[in-house]
Image: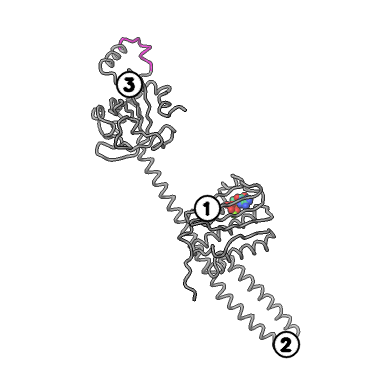
Amino acid sequence: MIPQRRQRRRIPGTAVLVVSFLGGYCAGEATAALRRARAARRPAKEGRRIDGRHIVHSASDAILSIDNGAVIVFANPAAAHMFATSVGAMQGSTLARFIQASGSDARSPLDYFPAGGGRAGRRATDYAVTGIRANGQLFPIEGSISSVEHEGRPVYTVILRDVSERHLVQQKLTRSHDQLRQLSSALQTIREEERTHIARELHDDLGQLLASLRMDLTLVRGHKHLSSASTQLLEGMENNLLTAIASLRRIATNLRPRALDEGGLYFALQGLRDEFVERHGIACALLADEAELRLDDGASTAVFRIVQEALTNIARHAEASSVVLTLDRSNHDLLVTIRDNGRGISAEDMEKVESLGLIGMRERVWALQGEITIGADEAPGTRIDISIPIAAHSRVEGPAS
Ligand SMILES: Nc1ncnc2c1ncn2[C@@H]1O[C@H](COP(=O)(O)OP(=O)(O)O)[C@@H](O)[C@H]1O
Ligand SMILES: [Mg+2]
């Protein structure tokens, strides 16, 4: 294999022009003067050829030529501007005054651009390094380094770009992304709290009222002197009342299953599975251990909502005939797998802009610092794998009372 550093020595096109110019510059005043004199004698046609000096002087990137001992032998005006100093002050100084070395014993220019370590940037040959302005201010730089032999000695050309602005924009983007995540997570929590509140009100208020109406109705129906028409009417009323109680329970459970607050995640998932099988006629196995699923409210709710969304998707899109839900605890992680034997999910399905179900699942997992993979790797069907660190989310059992 050819070492990276050697590969960098082959510089095509304009770069050759720049590097050969820089090499000539190092050779000293005499050579330069000779070239200037030759150039003056050259016919007009040759003078029209592109001059490397103009390219280097007018380049917007900083260009440095450095000798083997990391001393700057040439700097262009853009370099002086970038480091807030003058070309004169840069030439003759060591590179260490302007670029932070990765180790304390940096000698060669290559030590300032360590292979492997700082590689980052738009091109594979770019390095991320830290620049030092004349006033001591540090700033991020992206740059490349290459070398040519000049009179038996290597001459290094370093091209640098100040990326402070890009870093600032990236930081702002990251911050705004984090804020959006926090907002989304806060909205989920508020929504869950509202659902819990409404479900409780429905159950406690309306549920109690309907139950007492039913009791009253039973008393009235026990009355001796009722006409057959009244008995029929009361029977119809009781049937309607029973339907209303069942609907209310269903609505309240859909909002927030009581099992989640009273029994725990395992029982809530059992209820979800039973309802799914009954409603859609799709077989569904729940492989889990109740004791392993005693989690705090945040984690239980998140896992429950993820499984709920996955089952809704299976019913709506998968055309599956069976589903397996597996929840396993391994060391400090909860591993959740949801598998169906349906038509499978494609990459385009997962990128649908208007689909928020899968995005919501991912957000819930990431909010718990977990990982999620969704794919159709085991044909047929779709498989969702989730791993959530739950050491901090296990429910602490109080002493038995
Ligand atoms: N289990 C599944 N099997 C097949 N396709 C699926 C499955 N789950 C999701 N999909 C596909 O992924 C898409 C995105 O899902 P989702 O984000 O939940 O949005 P929505 O359900 O509102 O369409 C669905 O429209 C569907 O095409
Ligand atoms: Mg969906």
Residue 232 magenta: no
Q: Residue at x 25, y 39 (%)?
A: 136
Can residue 18 be seen in the rendering of this structure?
Answer: no
Q: Earlier in the sequence, mark 3 or mark 2?
A: 3
Q: Quadrant of residue 37?
A: top left
Residue 153, labelled with which disc? 3
The one nearer the camera, 346 or 40, is 346
Residue 226, labelled with which disc? 2
Q: Which stretch appears magenta? A: 40-49
Q: Earlier in the sequence, mark 1 or mark 3?
A: 3
Residue that carries the numbered disc 1 in the rendered image: 362
Q: Which element is circle 1 on?
A: helix
Residue 26, horizontal then vertical, whole percent: 29, 21
In the depicted structure, whether residue 27 falls above or below residue 158? above
Residue 45 magenta: yes
Q: Which element is circle 3 on?
A: strand
Q: Which element is circle 2 on?
A: loop
Of circles 2 and 1, the one toward us is: 1
The Cα atoms of the two marked residues, 1 and 3, are separated by 56 Å
Residue 283, horizontal then vertical, whole percent: 68, 59
Q: Assess mark 1: CB under 8 A from ligand 1?
A: no
